[in-house]
Image (spheres, rainbow, N blue to C red):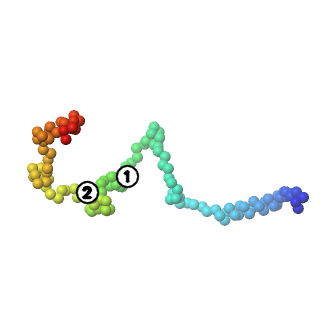
């Protein structure tokens, strides 16, 4: 067999017709007509923006009230959307009202910076960079 070249057999019209018929029947068996289309959830979607100067993309469309309500609800902060916190991170800062009245004249809680002659003098010397008088 190694010495004999393999001859290519040319099929006649009957054999070609039989092969085509088998292919056609196989396609009909495996073919399925789809009438409902959906997006493949396993494939990433790349959105294409519209052309800003095209006239048919900038036509006025009627406002969809349900969609607008959904967008406005999503844009609200979590304190307006929910009566209580949804996550543990929202618990920090959820209640914005202070626990005690922030009175500025109560010196038990407010320790303001007080400047006297000695503190002003030391601040000026530090500002000049004169650190040899420690």
* The C terminus lies in quadrant: top left
Identify the disc placed on residue 96: none
Residue at 14% in and 38% down: 120
Q: Residues within 10 Å of mark 2 (few under 14, many from 20)?
A: few
Q: In the displayed structure, does residue 36 sit left or right of residue 69?
A: right
Residue at 35% in and 53% down: 71
Where residue 112 appears, x then y in whole percent? 14, 47
Observer-side mark, 1 or 2, equals 2
Q: Residue furthest top?
A: 128
Nearer-the-camera pick, 87 or 43: 87
Cα–Cα span, label 1 and label 2: 35 Å
- Circle 2 residue: 93
Q: Residue furthest right?
A: 3
Q: In the displayed structure, does residue 32 sit left or right of residue 71?
A: right
Nearer-the-camera pick, 2 or 122: 122
Q: In the displayed structure, does residue 15 sit left or right of residue 52?
A: right
Q: Secondary structure at mark 1?
A: loop
Question: Is 42 placed above or below 115 here?
Answer: below
* The N terminus lies in quadrant: bottom right
Nearer-the-camera pick, 58 or 113: 113
Nearer-the-camera pick, 56 or 116: 116
Residue at 47% in and 45% down: 49
Q: Secondary structure at mark 2?
A: loop
- Circle 1 residue: 64
Mark 1 touches mark 2? (CB < 8 Å): no
Where residue 27 appears, x then y in whole percent? 68, 61
Q: Residues within 10 Å of mark 1 (few under 14, many from 20)?
A: few
Q: Earlier in the sequence, mark 1 or mark 2?
A: 1
Q: Quadrant of residue 90?
A: bottom left
Residue at 23% in and 35% down: 129
């Amino acid at each position: 067999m190694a010495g004999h070249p393999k001859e290519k057999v040319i099929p006649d019209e009957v054999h070609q017709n039989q092969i085509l018929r088998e292919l056609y029947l196989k396609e009909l068996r495996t073919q399925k007509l789809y009438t409902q289309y959906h997006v493949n959830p396993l494939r990433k979607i790349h959105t294409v923006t519209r052309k800003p100067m095209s006239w048919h993309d900038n036509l006025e469309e009627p406002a969809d009230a349900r969609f607008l309500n959904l967008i406005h609800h999503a844009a609200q902060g979590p304190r307006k959307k929910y009566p209580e916190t949804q996550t543990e991170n929202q618990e920090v800062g959820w209640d914005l009202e202070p626990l005690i009245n922030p009175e500025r004249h109560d010196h038990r809680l407010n320790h303001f910076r007080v400047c006297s002659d000695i503190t002003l003098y030391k601040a000026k010397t530090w500002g000049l960079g004169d650190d040899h008088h420690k």
